[in-house]
Image: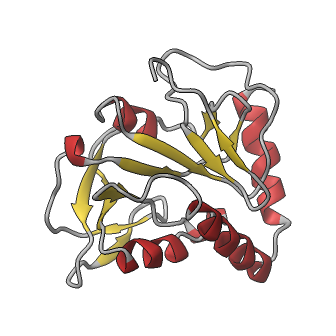
Amino acid sequence: MLKNDLRIKYKELRDTISPQKRLHLSLTIANKLLELPVWHSEYYHIFLPIVNKKEVDTSFILSILQGKDKNILLPKVDGKNTLKHFLLTDNTKLAANKWGIPEPIDGIEIDVTKIEVVFVPLLAFDKKGNRVGYGKGFYDTFLSSCKESVLKIGLSFFEAEDNIKDIIPEDISLDYCVTPDKTYSFTRPNS
């Protein structure tokens, strides 16, 4: 399928999930993440869900990271297609931006080169690790500026599509994607 068709399909599918079921599925995804070999790192980048987009609730993953005493970085939109990354602390104040994304108002900015693991939002993904987001390019731009070894973990309520047909060279693929029923691992080039 094409990206735009997948965006329509998965937005509609998300709308069919009740708030209670979404919480249950989000907790299941968080628990499945514990099985991945990614917990030795120090700097983890995580998105906060857009409530009206019915994204995976990452609060359970935040609790895991805090329990493991990890450095947690939150994104903040900065200009066209770029993100800044702020350390989550007890003093971090959040506000929704114009797209409804909760983000830090300010704080301690961390350089992108320190990030070791990124939990990536998405609408859909395929069996090769390609992902479809909302089409603004924020995460592809951000991930292309990370060090090559950064682990990219998608979070999805739904299983993989066979193939996303209109992938372009600027699209950054995932290393893993975790769903409530399955964990997908994708082969990394040169690894």
Q: Give x and y (percent) for residue 11.
A: 75, 53
Q: Is residue 184 above or below residue 164?
A: below
Q: Nearer the viewer, residue 155 or 35?
A: 35
- Residue 137 shown left or right of residue 76 in the figure: right
Q: How many marks?
A: 0
Instruction: Name the colour scheme.
Output: secondary structure
**Whole-percent x, y for residue 161 in the image:** 80, 35
Q: Residue at x 77, y 40 (%)?
A: 160
Q: Residue at x 70, y 71 (%)?
A: 28
Can residue 24 be seen at all in this image of the molecule?
Answer: yes
Q: Residue at x 20, y 83 (%)?
A: 91
Q: Position of residue 84 (x, y in %)?
A: 25, 50
Q: Position of residue 17 (x, y in %)?
A: 82, 69
Task: Tell which residue pokes out farthest to the left in this image.
Answer: 108
Residue 134 seen in the current view: no
Figure quadrant of residue 40: bottom left
* Quadrant where the image shows the N terminus: top right
- Where 16 sits versus 12, above or below? below
Foreground: 26 or 168? 26
Which sits in the foreground, 10 or 43?
43
Residue drawn at x 48%, y 42% as measured from the top left: 152
110 sits to left or right of 30: left
Residue 13, by quadrant, is: bottom right
